[in-house]
Amino acid sequence: MSNRHEPFVASGDIQPSPPPSSVVGPIAWVRENLFSGVANTVMTLIGIYVIYSLLASLVPWLLLNSVWNASSLQDCRSIDNGACLAVIRERYLQFIYGFYPTEERWRPVVAFVLMLVALWPVLFAGAPRKLLYASALYPATAYWLIWGGTIWGPLAVMAGPIVGIILYRVFDKVLSGMMDEGIAGILSMAGALLLTITWWLFAVVQVDAILGSILNIGLEPVASDKIGGFLLSMIIGVSGIAGSFPLGIALALGRQSNLIFIKALCTGFIEFIRGVPLITLLFVASVLLQYFLPPGTTFDLILRVVIMVTLFAAAYMAEVIRGGLAALPKGQYEAADALGLDYWKSMRLIVLPQALKISIPGIVNTFIGLFKDTTLVIVIGMLDPVGILGPIRADQNWNGIVWELYGFIAIFFFVFCFGMSRYSLYLERKLQTGHR
């Protein structure tokens, strides 16, 4: 009888062994990304040394030795040699509101909260769709809250789009029987837009004055020169972002139009704006624009700046969106034609959704650049966060302080710009349709 051993036969499933720590996990990531070769190891060690040197100087200055309770820079230096953050503690309300009246500061706070509510359904698909009505009403509501005055002016402004939609439908119905539907739609939209702008420029003031004299319901007016700090940056930045996006889409479509006049007008506008520095446009808004208005006409400086910033950003936005339109395969346009869709339906349902998804990084990059460019209004004397530094440093108690103030402003812009970049990545992941 053979004494040979029988081979082992498993009687059940064998659980897989965990992968070695050198292949997965933090150790594997460090080896692959930081110490994968000689050059990579040297650069990693240099980077670690630079970061350590910066933190070794910054952490004691900013966190360990900083002074929060003092009445002047000299008091800070007598207490400790760290960051004199007492100036932030004393002047942070001025950074936020500028010289906005103290008893009325609840109004910008309410406007900011309402802005978050208005942006919720626009930025996130899970929000209740009925909140889009709040989004549509928000611009006029925020203007009324911040600047005050009678309630009839904002109501007349909100009536403008309603008048424009009614006029567009009337024009489109009349012109559709006379010419091609695409051309009729463009002309109808241009006519309705022109009349809506005319309503805003000439009728709103008269309606506000007439109804205000009959029934004066409103808030205490606040002059524009009282608005400053982060409030001013938010007004210009959010208004410019909200206005430049639809205007940029219209310019991008107009530049690709088959109508020579529309194409030439949009192309000329885009090339002119892109060829002129924003500072020059701000000077035009501050000084020259008033000369082109009828005598006695008052045109608020912040509104002029918002218009110029919006037009400037719209020109760059148009080129970003045009790049997305050019990246679409020709078959997408042919598919829209094969389905029998007219120009506007094909753009709304097929072309623009794909082009905008392709253009998300460029669009958000333009938004971030626009928000940071709001600091340029200091050149025309407006007290944005950087402009607020002048009155603060002019105070002899804080004369000579620099890094703490600029660092506080930098943190503000970083938070908002970083938030926009994170939302861009979230939107790209949400709209991704390819294989993962």
Image (spheres, rainbow, N blue to C red):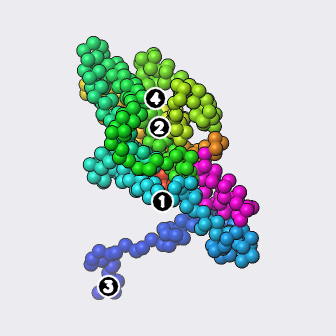
Q: Main secondary structure of the magenta part?
A: helix
**4 and 1 marks in contact (CB < 8 Å):** no
Q: What amino acid type is highlighted by mark number 3?
A: Ser
Is 150 placed left or right of 79 in the picture?
Answer: left
Q: Point out the frontmost of discs 1 and 3.
A: 1
Q: Where are the magenta residues, as a range? A: 382-409
Which comes before the other along the chain, label 1 or label 2?
1
Residue with the mark numbered 2 = 244
Is 36 placed left or right of 346 in the picture?
Answer: right
Residue 358 appears in view = no
The residue positioned 34% from the left and 83% from the top of the image is: 5
Q: Which mark is residue 361?
A: none
Give the distance between the C-alpha atoms of the residues marked 1 and 3, in whole angstroms: 103 Å
Residue with the mark numbered 4 = 251
Q: Secondary structure at mark 2?
A: helix
The one of 397 and 358 positioned closer to us in this rendering? 397
Q: Which mark is residue 2?
A: 3
Which comes before the other along the chain, label 4 or label 2?
2
Q: Which mark is residue 103?
A: 1
Give the distance between the C-alpha atoms of the residues marked 1 and 2, in whole angstroms: 34 Å
Q: Point out the frontmost of discs 3 and 4.
A: 4
Q: What amino acid type is highlighted by mark number 2?
A: Ser
Q: Position of residue 43 (x, y in %)?
A: 68, 61
Is 202 placed left or right of 75 in the picture?
Answer: left
